[in-house]
Image (cartoon, rainbow, N blue to C red):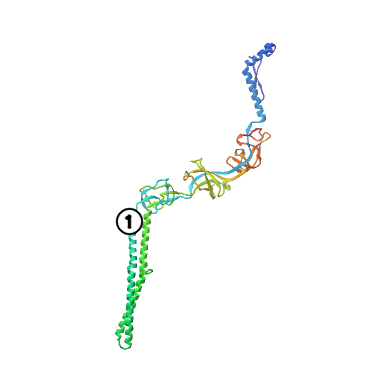
Amino acid sequence: MGRRHALPTRGGAWAFAVVGSLHVTGLIGRGADATKGAPAFLWSHRWFVLAVVVVLGLGGWQGARMWFGPGVVVDIAKRGALIETVVATGNVETLYRVIIGSQITGTVEQVLVEEGVRVTKGQPLIALESRELKAAVVQAQGAVAQAEARTRQIDELTLPTARETRKEAQATLLNAQQTFDRTSDLSRNGFATHAALDTAQRDLDVGHTQVRSAEVQVYTSSPGGSDYVMAQTQLNQARASLDTATSRLAYATISAPRDGVLITRNVERGTVAQPGNTLLVLAPDGDTQLLLAIDERNMGKLALGQHAIASADAYPDKRFDAIISYINPAVDITRASVEVKLTVAAPPAYLRQDMTVSVDIEVARSANALVLPVRSVRDGLSGDPWVMGVRNGRAYKQSVRLGLQGNTQIEVLAGIKDGDAAIPASAGVLTGQRIRPITP
């Protein structure tokens, strides 16, 4: 074999030629033998020939690639429906929570519920030791009975007796008045002495006094009189004391103020419960709300009543509706966010307090927007967004004006038209580079 010389080919490939020992001219000069020898020669060097053909093909392909540019998958601007959403995460909470404690000081005798159970309004939750309270109720009941007896005594005995006494005093006064009149006439005619007249006057005065005394007794025993009022007051006080004792006895059984779920329990048997201490926390039934912290840059897009789709992180495949019901006018300066609350009118059964949820809030909608995938828009959050377009086989920079921004697509208001191609940012294409656009 002779020496091998490396020959450059177009596109960077190399071909090798064998020189010296092949004696090709000698093969040609052999006439018919030469025609038979050529196929034999090619066959005997078939791998070399194949390598040369492959190298030449690669070189040609590489050259064509350099001339026409690499193939790049592009996105095509087209018309379609677009929904702009604001995505945020937050937590589940009820509109409020009920702190359950004791209104009196007492020792916990029994805890009747466990944390996490559903309770109904009026259901007993905690029982306190109540012997002293029961004794106070019995004592108050006795005071009420005594006051009621005093009132009945006035109605049934004192007042009727006073009325009878008044009748007797009036009769006595009438008799004394008649006696005085007769004695006066007799005295004027000289038939009665002055002593008899004085006696008649004295009896008349006593009669008047007895009538006035009887009338006073009747008045004080009648409704509105002092004795009656005092008896009625004592009865009212006794009944109030009974109500107080009964209420304190009722406080010994701590009941659920409304329907809901107990989410916290801080009490055990033997605990000394005191007013102001939190024993249980109740999440009442009713509207459930989602509490979100949304980037303040999106504050201008939010409005009360906007619809949202939410899902709990624990159940990502299950979605439920929510409505914006509150937007805090103040911005949290430490987190650069605004607090937003959404009401869930029909919360699913699996929803729990403090669950983490993901929420998509629909802030705008367009039925015929010119859209591009988000990946093809550069500097979308800046004041000068642009896309990498294709013109005459080369990439060029085109400024655009944006509209609605969806999760995967974005509306282009100006700069490109329907059917224009845009190069994704991930393609790594430079401005002015020659490319071959490929439509997906």
Q: Say whether residue 186 is left or right of residue 425.
A: left
- Residue depicted at 65% across the width and 24% down the height: 57
Q: Say whether residue 326 is left or right of residue 113.
A: right
Q: Which residue is mark 1?
A: 135
Q: Position of residue 99 (x, y in %)?
A: 43, 50
Q: Position of residue 438 (x, y in %)?
A: 63, 33
Residues packed near mark 1 inside 10 Å, few (<14), some (14 to 19) or many (20 plus): few
- In the image, 401 versus 213, the foreground residue is 213
Residue 155 sits above or below residue 429 on the image:
below
Q: Position of residue 174 (x, y in %)?
A: 33, 79
Q: Say whether residue 329 is left or right of residue 228.
A: right
Residue type at mark 1?
A: Ala
Q: Position of residue 312 (x, y in %)?
A: 50, 42
- Residue depicted at 34% across the width and 63% down the height: 148
Toward the bottom, the furthest residue is 190
Q: Say whether residue 358 is left or right of residue 8.
A: left
Question: In this orientation, does residue 226 appear?
Answer: yes
Residue 55 sits above or below residue 375 on the image:
above
The quarter of the picture where residue 31 lies is top right
Quadrant for the C terminus in the image: top right
